[in-house]
Image (tube, helix red, strand yellow):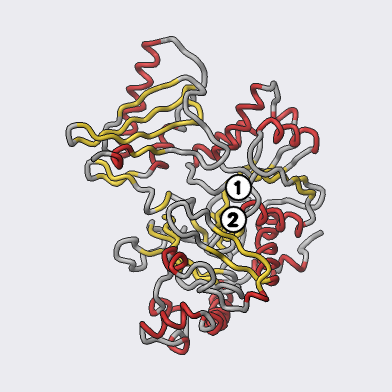
Amino acid sequence: MENPSFLHPQYESLSRAEIEALQTERLQKTLQQCMKSPFYRKRFEENHISPRDIRSLGDMSKIPFTTKQDLRDNYPFGLSTVPLSEVVRLHSSSGTTGKPTVILHTKRDIEQWADAVARCLYMVGLRPGDVFQNTSGYGMFTGGLGFQYGAERLGLLTVPAAAGNTKRQIKFITDFGTTAIHAIPSYAGRLYEVMSEMGIDPRRDTRLKTLVIGAEPHSEEQRRRIETMLGVKAYNSFGMSEMCGPGVAFECPEQNGMHIWEDYYIVEIVDPVTLEPVPDGEVGELVLTTVNREAMPLLRYRTRDLTRILPGDCPCGRHHKRLDRMKGRSDDMMILKGVNIFPIQIETILMQFPELGNEYLITLTNEDANDLMTVEVELKEFSDDYPKLQALTKEITRQLKDEILVTPQVRLVPKGSIPVTDGKAVRVRDLRKTLI
């Protein structure tokens, strides 16, 4: 099944000039489609612009940003550009911090989304005959149905295991001969731990070869550790419900950045404070514009995710821009004693120590008007060698201080001490917020 037509291989091989010409053409159509939305008609009128003012990609800066708050303020259907009779599915956030956000899809939107995910999986070598197990939740969360439709489109045998019940996941892996699995990084580590407890060696006792990871920031060190534990190649994936879900950007076999599919999206990186563009290679906030959606296109959507465009060409031959792994979100940043710190900086240091396990927890407190950071991290194995543990704690503290410019209190705790969940890992507890 080489180069199946529904994967649109002609779009993968476009030159930079061809990509930008296609984006310009699709942007013009998207702008006209957006004018069917009450929200965008009003937004353009308020800013005294019209689609005719956007003649090239260089005019993108004239378009106002769209934010998550805009989606909440226009809940549920205020950004729709088609009649609801043409909408076949919606996905929604939980709305735990306010009104939920709703994303609408036509039948064509769903088909294009499936194509994008299938393209990603095909790129890393999956073919009919592979068994793809999805540990994402199904329902309103896009990771379940997004990968399900994409894997089916590619012709894979799919195992819609959904989230949780780790021993059942492992039984499926061994009984069904699972070759590829989708899991968040922290859960991949949990799978290995339970396999070890059950006496299962994933290299010997399973057919696993490919792991798709995403949904939570992780370091290169954690990725390599997961690959070693499970005996797989782990490929970074990026998606978000506002853009459709998974399939927005994906690593190729070179594993040196995620190709963002520019026949679907226009990508910008801006300074999260000034909102001015930053040069390729510099970290900023990811801003995306959809150019291949019918029901609910979004213009210059501020994702809040922090990343950078990797300069240069990829050896794989694709010219679609590459995004670096997500550094975190602008609202995940911790400010301690005037220093900006991201959890992934701490993880990068911790994962370099073979004595440490996969779980850690950062706790921020305030004592006598002084901000303090405590880093609890699990040991991989029990040890009562106090001098050795003391030396290890001292070295971890030194390296963390060199990285984050703040001296944390490091606590080595036994394996199993830090609570784990089937969802995204909780890495930070900021107890300062509860102080009166």
| Residue lying at the far left of the rendered structure | 368
Q: Position of residue 320 (x, y in %)?
A: 56, 65
Q: Position of residue 361 (x, y in %)?
A: 42, 33
150 to the left or right of 413: right
Q: Quadrant of the C terminus?
A: top left
Q: Are marks 1 and 2 in contact (CB under 8 Å)?
A: yes
Give the amino acid at mark 2: Phe
Name which residue lies at 75% across and 45% down: 159
Numbered circle sitting on residue 235: 1
| Closer-to-camera residue (245/20) | 245
| Closer-to-camera residue (392/429) | 429
Q: Quadrant of the N terminus?
A: bottom right
Name which residue lies at 52% across and 18% down: 381
In the picture of the structure, the residue carrying the numbered disc 2 is 250
Give the amino acid at mark 1: Tyr
Q: Residues within 10 Å of mark 2 (few under 14, many from 20)?
A: many
Q: Position of residue 138 (x, y in %)?
A: 65, 50
Numbered circle sitting on residue 270: none
What secondary structure is found at the residue carrying circle 1? Answer: strand
Name which residue lies at 41% across and 64% down: 69
Name which residue lies at 55% across and 79% down: 30
Mark 1 to mark 2: distance in Å?
7 Å
